[in-house]
Amino acid sequence: IFSLEMNTQQLVDRMLSAEARVNAWKLRTGKLSLDEDFDKLRNSLDRLSKAPVFIDDQSGNTIMKMRSAARKLKSEHGLGLIIVDYLQLMNTSRHYDSMVNQVTEISHSLKGLAKDLDVPVIALSQLSRALEARGGKPKLSDLRDSGSIEQDADVVMFIHREDKMDKNAEKTNIAEIIVEKHRNGPVGAIKLYFDEEKSTFMSIDKHHDYEGMPRNAGGNFEDF
């Protein structure tokens, strides 16, 4: 994971909260009180410490540094996935007057990295401010600063929260995962429940505490 926005401790805290299913704020502030929570944390810490996850939190990272680190990891440990959070924070090989040109180089470079190492790359991206003004669900043209992201990506997915766009939304904490582009498969959307306190997505069917949402309302993963 190349984390250009959060440092390693912040990222690990979120991973631990999600894995243990404990309140993230209570974890950060040391206000956990239930013995059950501490048991969950111990078990999750053990699992995460053994997980083949490596975090590089250098700010302003470049594609050359990422490529070097990724090659070394692949050689020494094997490499199944690269995550970049997020691509607009990466530095380029030279200065550009236009952010569009800068993001274009970054996008092309990440595409090349995925092909050269034969490893999937998940790159997070900011969305354009135009979406806030327009409202509604995000679309490909909302990818910030460059159309090259849309062109280079094999799959483009958005997370849409209606309750974040509309404070009067009927249902809260429902995240619609929108597959807007899929080079080798179908597009579509599915709804999941998002537990903000624990930084966790889960099937609506499995979230028994959420009332008012009919079963199977979110679609079916088998559709993809």
Image: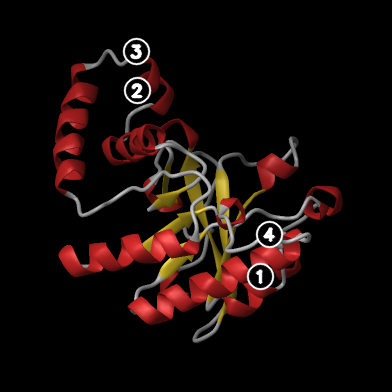
The structure's colour scheme is secondary structure
Label 2 packing within 10 angstroms: few (<14), some (14-19), many (20+): some
Label 4 packing within 10 angstroms: few (<14), some (14-19), many (20+): few
* Residue tagged 4: 95
Quadrant of res 99? bottom right
Sequence-first disc among 1 and 4: 4
Kind of residue at badge 2: Leu
Q: Secondary structure at mark 1?
A: helix
Q: Nearer the viewer, mark 1 or mark 3?
A: 1
Q: Is residue 90 left or right of residue 141?
A: left
Q: Position of residue 43 (x, y in %)?
A: 15, 35
Q: Position of residue 206 (x, y in %)?
A: 37, 48
**Distance from Cα at disc 1 to Cα at disc 4:** 13 Å
**Residue drawn at the location 85% of the way across and 54% of the way down:** 134
Judged from this view, the residue extending furthest toward the bottom is 184
Sequence-first disc among 4 and 2: 2
Kind of residue at badge 4: His
Residue 27: image tag: 2
Residue 175 at least partly seen: yes
Q: Secondary structure at mark 4?
A: loop
Q: Nearer the viewer, mark 4 or mark 2?
A: 4
Sequence-first disc among 3 and 4: 3
Q: Position of residue 23 (x, y in %)?
A: 38, 26
Sequence-first disc among 1 and 3: 3
Residue 31: image tag: 3
Sequence-first disc among 1 and 2: 2
Q: Nearer the viewer, mark 1 or mark 4?
A: 4
Q: Position of residue 87 (x, y in %)?
A: 56, 57
**Distance from Cα at disc 4 to Cα at disc 2:** 41 Å
Is disc 4 in contact with disc 2, using a CB cutoff of under 8 Å?
no
Kind of residue at badge 1: Thr
* Residue tagged 1: 104
